[in-house]
Image (cartoon, helix red, strand yellow):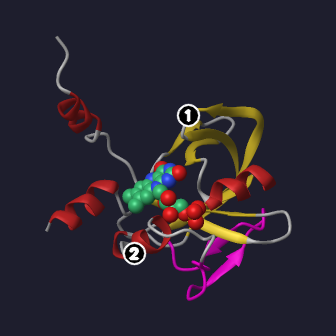
Amino acid sequence: MVQERKKIIDAVNKITYGLYVLSSVSNDGKINGQICNTIFQITSIPLRVAVGINKQNYTFELIKESGVFAINVLKQSQIDFVPIFGLKSGRTMNKFENLKYHPGFTKSPILDDILSWMECKIVSGMTADCGTHTLFIADVVDGFTVSNEEPLTYKYYRDSRTK
Ligand SMILES: Cc1cc2nc3c(=O)[nH]c(=O)nc-3n(C[C@H](O)[C@H](O)[C@H](O)COP(=O)(O)O)c2cc1C
């Protein structure tokens, strides 16, 4: 007999993740970003990551169009970025309005104050339709570590909400 669904979900929720601002750009230069936890390195040679993006997100539209994105690794002290980038849509606001950022090699926006960043190009043919989400596999084409502070994790965010 299998466990009841809530217990299974509780077990799944023990998987650990970081929280990131995943940003992208349209071909005519519109920028946006969203919180993403489904990001992991999948191969070392070549250096590749996999990201899971909900098809309803504005960021998804930009990624589909340009095939590029940047991963901004948040610091623990940047937990306030979560409601801005993760609970609102860039369709109705400019999430970068009050933040310092610069365009990267792929033209995706990179936050100046961040733990580290990397820029990625989707590998042709390497996407998987997962229902609500699409899994994109992408080559990491550039990256840099800006600070050595503690990274923001999903657990830290969850724990902060129950305090
Ligand atoms: C803690 C947290 C984790 C999230 N993880 C993901 C994720 O892995 N993939 C995803 O597509 N959306 C994720 N989201 C939801 C998007 O960040 C959210 O829908 C966002 O408002 C989309 O913005 P956009 O429409 O401007 O692209 C997450 C949100 C939160 C708060």
Mark linked to residue 59: none
Query: What residue span does the magenta drawing correspond to?
Result: 93-114
Question: Residue at left 65%, top 69%?
Answer: 32
Q: Is residue 100 above or below residue 70?
A: below
Residue occupying image coordinates x 54% and y 40%: 132
Callout 2–callout 1 Cβ contact below 8 Å:
no
Can you give x and y, in whole percent of width and height, for residue 149 in the image?
Answer: 38, 70
**x and y percentages locating residue 83 in the rendered image:** 40, 71
Name the residue at the left extreme: 163
Left or right placement of residue 16 versus residue 133 in this view: left
The three-letter code of the residue at mark 1 reads Gly
Residue found farthest to the bottom = 98
**Disc number at residue 78?**
2
Q: Nearer the viewer, residue 16 or 133?
A: 133
Mark nearer the viewer, 2 or 1: 1
Q: Secondary structure at mark 1?
A: loop
